[in-house]
Image (cartoon, coloured by chain):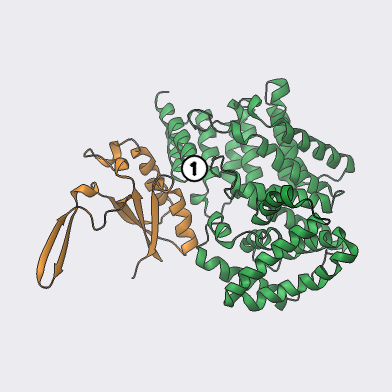
Amino acid sequence: MSDALVKALESWPQDGLPDNPEGWLLTVARRRLIDISRKTAKWAETQNALEQLVDEHGMERTDEDGANAFEDERLKLLFVCAHPAINEKIRAPLMLQTVLGLDARRIASAFLIAPGSLGQRLVRAKAKILEAGIRFDVPPAEQLEERLGSVLDTIYAAYTLGWDASYTDDSKSSNLVNEAIWLGQLLRQLMPDEPEVLGLLALMLFCESRRHARRDAQTGQYVPIGQQDPAAWSIDMIDEAEVCLRQAGSINRPGRYQLEAAIQAIHADRRRTGIINWPEIRMIYGGLVSFSPTLGAMLGYATACAECNETAAALEILDSLQIKQKERYQPYWAVRAHVLAQLGQVGEAADCFETAAGLSEDPSVRAYLLERRMGLGDG
Amino acid sequence: MQYMIMNYVLPDDFASDDRPETSADGPAWGAYTKAMIDAGVMVGGNALHPSHTATTLRIRNGQRELADGPYAETKEHLGGYFIIDVPDLDTALDWAAKNPAASTGSVEVRPVFR
């Protein structure tokens, strides 16, 4: 959770709930940003200009219009941060800093950007906003769907980065997943009738519900999804995810995040049925990749095909992938290894397991992949 | 650009007197090395014998000073290094994050003068 939220939660029991809690939170986050910018002279010019832009639109109206003014401002800020003119790689850090008031050093760590250089990149991004004359506004109706897609992708990028985050229970440790889900919740508050907003939140909640099942409680070993104990999944998160997904479905405007969430819903259903309905998952992936062939979706599709014993099809999908820097992309090698193992191509599978292990950041994932490799040798 | 990646590990995690490949986390290092070679970024690297095998030499006021042990008494010791050739620091950091020493020790990344 961001510092501003933590501060709020710590002080409310003593000081009582402020009249305008959201406004107060935003004020605290803004003040922290202004403090930080004052300490770093380099940032001052563009930072303050952006702050002024926010302030002009929001702060003065707080006392009169109350919470609504701030909600509008946060929504506009989300759209500004995800604007296409801003470099893809800096959108998520920018959003985390400006909307959540997160510390730049923590953001830099998560995104593997050298701490000294994130500051510069954020300054350039903010300068770009002012130079390019990006309007501090929710986009007009004809641009909304596309621009909203960018906002969702940015939030999801932060979530997926946090997906392999360490499994400490330290509630104070910065965990991108919490920030991303918070942004997802915020967006749902601000745009409750947008099905893809609901879809993204459902997707993140379904995935997050499994967090504690992903590692063995005693040994810390990695537990693949098919072997997880559903009793360790968070029922509250699954319930909320299902509500979001149902709401989205009723609006009848399908989209990428809704489909991804639906796939996760099928996984979650194993707690009721005891099995994973792979044919249904494969069918949804088939639909998903036809209009949103992201790398993750293609790999998921290949996996689902393999689980349905269509291993040749799975391999075809993998071979067809054009991946930038494929040699660095761990998920490709992990899926390929799994599919080749299923096909009985032991030598190649071993090779891929080893590569996937070498590309893993998480030691328990690395250990799991090396074990799978060793397990092949005995076959 | 070339970067040196230095693996700092706890003394217990050092390769023993056996060959490094046969130590407990030998496979992890092997996998990491293979991934970098396959990606075409590996320039070179070596595992080092444990720091107690180090000898440090200084010359001060014309006098040679020899001490048993590494340059500095630190909690983590230099266990080995890689030199990789990658386009930028972000990419080098991405590889450093995959380094087996990252989660139990520390990994230093530094550009090499060419």
Question: In the picture shown, does residue A326 fall above or below A315?
Answer: below
Residue depicted at x 43% and y 53%: B96
Outermost residue toward the top in this view: A274
Question: In the picture shown, does residue A280 fall above or below B77?
Answer: above
Outermost residue toward the front in this view: A14
Q: Colour of chain A?
A: green
Residue depicted at x 81% and y 68%: A59
Residue depicted at x 84% and y 65%: A62
Q: Residues within 10 Å of mark 1 (few under 14, many from 20)?
A: some
Q: Colour of chain B?
A: orange
Instruction: Using residue A140 as the reference point, say whether residue A286 is left or right of it.
Output: left
Nearer to the camera, A363 or A35: A35
| Quadrant the C terminus of chain A occupies | top left
- The spot of residue A225 in percent (x, y) is 60, 31
On the question of residue A346 being in view, the answer is no
Amino acid type indicated by mark 1: Asp
Instruction: Using residue A220 as the reference point, say whether residue A304 is left or right of it.
Output: right
Kindly state the secondary structure of the residue where label 1 is placed. loop
- The spot of residue B40 in percent (x, y) is 41, 55
- The spot of residue A315 in percent (x, y) is 57, 37
Location of residue A244 by image quarter: top right
Location of residue A143 by image quarter: bottom right
Q: Which residue has dot 1 on it?
A: A362
Q: Chain of mark 1?
A: A
Instruction: Using residue A126 as the reference point, say whether residue A219 is left or right of it.
Output: left
